[in-house]
């Protein structure tokens, strides 16, 4: 299920480009900004979901690079290369880190390949996350990733784009079986808040993209079945191992989270 040959369609919104717009990026079209503005205008504060997510992802990658021996990352549904992508964070902290990005959005692939042209330790693979075998056996993956050594599998803001009948737990299980003990899984995921904002945001995503499944902490944890979920568990992304830099997204316990910040969860798990 490779989308290698597909081209950019500026008339249809794309998840990657709407997300880029919400994060303040420039890789988007009017059609993407229209959807993004629904969030910005009608659901004010909702962009916190995207920023809190990115901040937690950055902290997790930095922590893996600094505190473990894992030097290979597979970033599933990686999105557009904005500042501080997984390879930048990992290679800044451990220069020998190798990163395989996986995404099906043609714009992500174009930008990713341009950005990574001179980076021998990073590749972009255009295979659907619902086809994990296709990702694992892709020549670029095999070139960079040694599956006899621990791997960090990044599932950041991607599993909520996989509907229940597409078996998101099966995707995680596949990777769990392929990687050796000592491997890590970082997950971030839309977190069901059972409130009007969640319902409204879910509706916009479903209507626009036909996907966007908000799950409870228990449902998210069950996607990680068979893995050891590390402290502090599955929690709102802003509360996942906050650090003390002064970014507004490193909230920690310093202030109450907004209702929106409760709507994105993060967690790190390890294969024993
Ligand atoms: N992982 C990044 C992060 O957390 O900041 C980006 C998350 S963005 C919300 C979701 C990304 O997943 C988009 O770039 C989209 O193109 C990609 N995506 C969605 N469905 C996908 C699929 N079935 N296979 C591969 N990529 C997919």
Image (cartoon, rainbow, N blue to C red):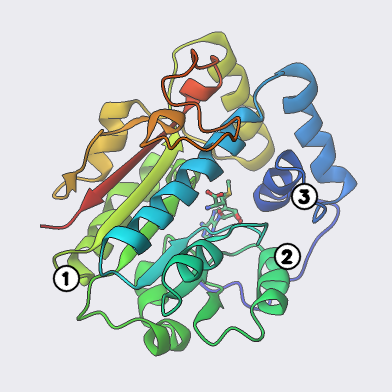
Tell me if I can see residue 256 in this picture: yes
Residue at image coords 76%, 70%:
7
Q: Is residue 42 left or right of residue 83?
A: right
Residue lying furthest top: 196
Q: Categorize mark 3 by other alpha carbons within 10 Å: few (<14), some (14-19), many (20+).
A: some
Q: Secondary structure under badge 1?
A: loop
Give the number of callouts. 3
Q: Secondary structure under badge 2?
A: helix
Q: Categorize mark 2 by other alpha carbons within 10 Å: few (<14), some (14-19), many (20+).
A: many
Closer-to-camera residue (156/51): 51
Closer-to-camera residue (49/84): 84
Q: Which residue is mark 2?
A: 107
Percent position of residue 158, x then y: 48, 49
Lower sequence index among marks 3 and 1: 3
Closer-to-camera residue (107/228): 228
Task: Indicate which disc residue 233 carries.
Answer: none
Instruction: In the rendered view, tell whether residue 151 sits above or below residue 122.
Output: above
Q: Residue 30 falls in which quadrant of the image?
A: top right
Task: Indicate which disc residue 25 carries.
Answer: 3
Percent position of residue 3, x then y: 60, 72
Instruction: In the rendered view, tell whether residue 131 sits above or below residue 30.
Output: below
Percent position of residue 136, x then y: 36, 76
Task: Indicate which disc residue 180 carries.
Answer: 1
């Amino acid at each position: 299920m490779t989308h290698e040959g597909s081209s950019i369609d500026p008339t249809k919104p794309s998840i990657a480009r709407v997300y880029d717009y919400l994060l303040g990026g420039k890789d988007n079209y009017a059609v993407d900004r229209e959807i993004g503005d629904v969030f910005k205008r009608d659901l004010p504060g909702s962009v916190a979901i995207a920023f809190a997510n990115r901040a937690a992802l950055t902290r997790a990658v930095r922590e893996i690079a600094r505190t473990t021996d894992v030097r290979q990352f597979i970033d599933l549904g990686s999105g557009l290369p904005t500042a501080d992508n997984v390879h930048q964070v990992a290679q800044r902290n451990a220069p020998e880190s190798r990163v395989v990005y996986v995404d099906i959005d043609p714009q992500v692939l174009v930008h990713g390949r341009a950005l990574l042209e001179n980076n021998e330790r990073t590749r972009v693979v255009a295979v659907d996350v619902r086809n994990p075998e296709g990702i694992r056996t892709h020549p670029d993956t095999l070139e960079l990733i040694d599956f006899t050594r621990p791997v960090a599998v990044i599932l950041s803001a991607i599993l909520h784009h996989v509907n229940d009948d597409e078996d998101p737990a099966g995707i995680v299980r596949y990777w769990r079986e392929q990687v050796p003990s000592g491997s890590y899984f970082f997950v971030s995921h839309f977190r069901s808040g059972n409130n009007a904002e969640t319902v409204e945001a879910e509706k916009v995503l479903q209507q626009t993209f036909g996907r966007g499944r908000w799950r409870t902490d228990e449902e998210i944890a069950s996607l990680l079945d068979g893995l050891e979920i590390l402290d502090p568990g599955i929690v709102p992304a802003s509360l996942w191992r906050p650090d003390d830099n002064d970014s507004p997204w490193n909230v920690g316990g310093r202030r109450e989270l907004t209702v929106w910040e409760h709507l994105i969860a993060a967690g790190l798990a390890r294969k024993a």
